[in-house]
Amino acid sequence: MPAGGEGALTVTVRMKVSPEPEQEEAILDLLRRYRDALNYSIRVIIANKAVSLGKAHKLLYKELRERYGLSSTIAVGCYRDAIAIAKSWLRKPKRGKVPMVKRLSMWLKQEQGYRVKDDHVELAGGYRLRVIGWDRRYDDFPNREARLVFRDGEFTLYITKQVPRPAKYAPKGVLAVDINEKQIVVGNSRVEIRVETPIERALYYRRLAERLQEKYSSSRYRAWLRRSGIRRRIRRFYRKARNIIEDWARRTAHIIVSLAKQSQLAVAREDLTGLVESLRKLPKDHRTALIALGYRRLAFWLDWQAEKNGVPLFVVEPAGTSSTCPRCGTKLVEVGYRRLRCPNCGLEADRDTIAILNIEGRALGKMGGTLTSPTAPQVTDVSPNRWGEPVNRPKGTLAL
Ligand SMILES: [Zn+2]
């Protein structure tokens, strides 16, 4: 779901669709032919470095029409799809094998490729699918290109739309987000909320996957068993682990952005590029891989949802956020497990609380004169013990 151009955002609307029973096989057959044609096109485009539409058309159009039986619109969509995949592969510095598309997913141009009419969708070639349900928030905006996907027995049409970028309000303060391995802390000098990350839960599934993998890779098991069902189960566990992280990131970002919007605050997060990079350099380990994934996905959804909701967002420099005093800038000393104290001004707080205050302070600094409210929180006002909640709250206080 990439962000759009100047004044617009590109959103993707998910539409559940279902073919008329007598057409289901024909549509699946079309999707399979499209996939085969796509894989063929990717190989031809890469072999000939034919990444322009004109070159690809000359090399592929006739073949896609005759050998794969694609209609003219679908054939054009197919080599365009292939060009995009080939380009991103050619751009990679370390290339593996030529990419091979396995899933059933067909790119469709608006109007010629597909049309939504009341309660059904018409695809080029006269196929009809019933519309079961969709997100109606963007109904007023015209449909652009779409993708028909068949997965786990269901058909979904992903329709892209251009939506005007909402105007951002002038923030009355900052809601800072500090991301750790075990929890994320959201707050400012007045409130603080802690949310557990799902790393442990996701790891549980990865471990299950590994255990299965180990068990069945032994030669005691027959080759067919090692190949088929077990592989599928292992893949399912890996996917499950990734989905846990993704769902959590999306929901958590949604809650944070809603909270900020309610109180007309800006969201501030650290720049995680360096952190994710340094995790990548560690020995390949499932835990670090999942943590890096969680960081990236949360940052992605925060940025995206802030953009979509007109919530101002600041990305601040992360160096020293959990080791310098938010009040006077002095280097803090450790006085207990994750507890820090300022030798200069005496401020003492939890490591994460310190990070929140520093991130808030840095964002306020970036905002300069844009604060609109005289009651905006002052970093110098901090008294960590005044916050109603004990700093080490019981876990799971926010139902996620
Ligand atoms: Zn201090």
Image (cartoon, rainbow, N blue to C red):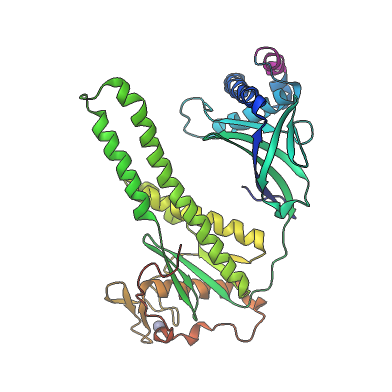
- Could you tell me what secondary structure mostly forms the magenta stretch? helix
- Kindly indicate the quadrant of the structure image that contains residue 387: bottom left
Between 46 and 126, the residue placed more toward the observer is 126
212 to the left or right of 9: left
Name the residue at 40% across, 56% down: 198
Name the residue at 43% across, 41% down: 239
Between 68 and 311, the residue placed more toward the observer is 68
Q: Residue furthest front?
A: 21
Number of numbered discs on residues: 0
- The spot of residue 209 in percent (x, y) is 32, 40
Between 77 and 201, the residue placed more toward the observer is 201
Name the residue at 41% across, 75% down: 354
Q: Is residue 32 above or below residue 307?
A: above
Question: Which residues are drawn in magenta?
Answer: 58-67
Between 139 and 344, the residue placed more toward the observer is 139
Q: Is residue 10 above or below residue 180?
A: above
- The spot of residue 389 in percent (x, y) is 40, 80
- The spot of residue 356 in percent (x, y) is 46, 72
234 to the left or right of 273: left
Q: Is residue 326 magenta?
A: no
Asked if residue 273 can be seen in this view, the reply is no
